[in-house]
Image (spheres, rainbow, N blue to C red):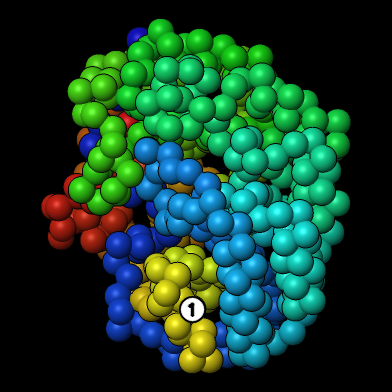
Amino acid sequence: MSHAIPEELLRRFDVPGPRYTSYPTADRFVEAFTESDYVQALAQRRAGSLALPLSLYVHIPFCESVCYYCACNKVITKHHSRAAEYLRYLTREVELQVAHLGQGHNVSQLHLGGGTPTFLSDSELEALMTMLRQHFTLVPGGEYSVEVDPRTVTEERLKTLARLGFNRLSFGVQDFDPAVQKAVHRVQPAEQVFELVAAARRIGFESVNVDLIYGLPLQTPQSFARTLAQVNELRPDRIALYAYAHLPSRFKPQRRIAAADLPGAGDKLSMLSLSLDALIDAGYVYVGMDHFALPNDALAVAKRQGRLHRNFQGYSTQPDCDLIALGVSAIGRIGATYSQNAKTLDEYRDLLDQGRLPIVRGLALTRDDLLRRAVIMALMCQGEVLFESIELGHLIDFKSHFARELETLEGLAAAGLVRLSPSGIQVTETGWFLVRAIAMVFDKNLQVDLDRARFSRII
């Protein structure tokens, strides 16, 4: 039994649901949204009087080997020569973006994801950053982060990343247990990670994140407790703790995992309970949605001050802003639209060869989408919805418009997840751990679509 949240509640709300890095969620994107719709959104931004800073996401799809749990869009190859060609196409995509958007826009957030961004050589990373700076202005004080596979970097490579302007690192660890690492085809000694995190601190990175996954093959509550003890000794600034979603019908690498090796539902709940206890006892703040941070980390400070934001990369301290997405399968947001690039390298290159942006689907948000997004993001980020604020911003009467949702929330209030008052909704301390379940109440698409199997489980 966790002192953070009763195990009975964990069991009750162990249901599939979205992670709400956007609303509506990406599974609602349609092919009827085309490049011309995206270009129109860029034109509207360019014509706007307030040129707020941008966020950039660059997807580097390449990995040298496959991790069996992975659900990311990636290309497995040991041929590093493929990276040079990919960078040429990224450059072409940026040039097309800037042709519609305008040159030199301020950027306050940059994230390199994948795949394995550190698949690129030092010179290729430098070429990428030089190209981005030629077209955008990376402002001082921004968040500039990169995902790092510990097997692909040394202290010298970390120094290169710092020199290129990155101030945040995210190390993929998942689990320190050697048997688990072997079962998911990702062997990396704990000593290697400890040395790299120590090096990152010497170099002066502002924040180091470590990713963990519970529910992997051969994991047990006892083995994961040992991993948690090592993580607390490592003491990264941030920890992302994800539940493994076994969906082999959707993600081919997962077919190499024997279902019999996966921990049962009871053990998985125990691992989550253990994690909450261990990390909170170690002094970490639960930020929300599987994210923990040390009290002095910018993310924990932003939560205390009510300044959290959320985008396709998760929680952020940067103000909500338009996101330019670059690379194969990347998802972006401009104004009241979402868009996604082609998911295969062949289609991505083919569209760029035609002089077209590689947009293949997306969504133009309706008035109701914008209203529900405002409510869901207020819950996810501030843990509070003030009726008057929503009513003034969207010209509705909250209690009549959301009468059905408020009735549903009565049950969550009885479970201790929210407090309802005449002026608004407040997420309780317990409710923060199940905030996805609270947000789902306002998801109109889930109300009419009972097929939630495409989502990972909340727990």
Q: Nearer the viewer, residue 32 or 190?
A: 190
Q: Residues within 10 Å of mark 1 (few under 14, many from 20)?
A: many
Say above or below: 411 vs 271: below
Percent position of residue 409, x then y: 27, 42
Q: Nearer the viewer, residue 414 or 190?
A: 190
In what quadrant of the picture does the C terminus appear? top left
Percent position of residue 440, x then y: 30, 48
Q: Residue at x 79, y 69 (%)?
A: 130
Say above or below: 312 vs 185: below
Q: Residue at x 74, y 24 (%)?
A: 195
Q: Nearer the viewer, residue 190 or 416?
A: 190
The residue tagged with tag 1: helix, strand or loop? helix
Residue type beneath disc 1: Arg
Q: Nearer the viewer, residue 373 or 113?
A: 113
The residue that disc 1 covers is 349
Q: Residue at x 86, y 31 (%)?
A: 202
Q: Quadrant of residue 235?
A: top right
How many numbered circles does the render carry?
1
Percent position of residue 3, x then y: 43, 13
Q: Is residue 342 visible?
A: yes
- Residue 452 appears left or right of 437: left
Percent position of residue 399, x then y: 30, 57
- Residue 275 appears left or right of 456: right
Q: Is residue 11 visible?
A: no
Q: Residue at x 68, y 31 (%)?
A: 237
- Residue 121 appears left or right of 41: right
Say above or below: 233 vs 28: above
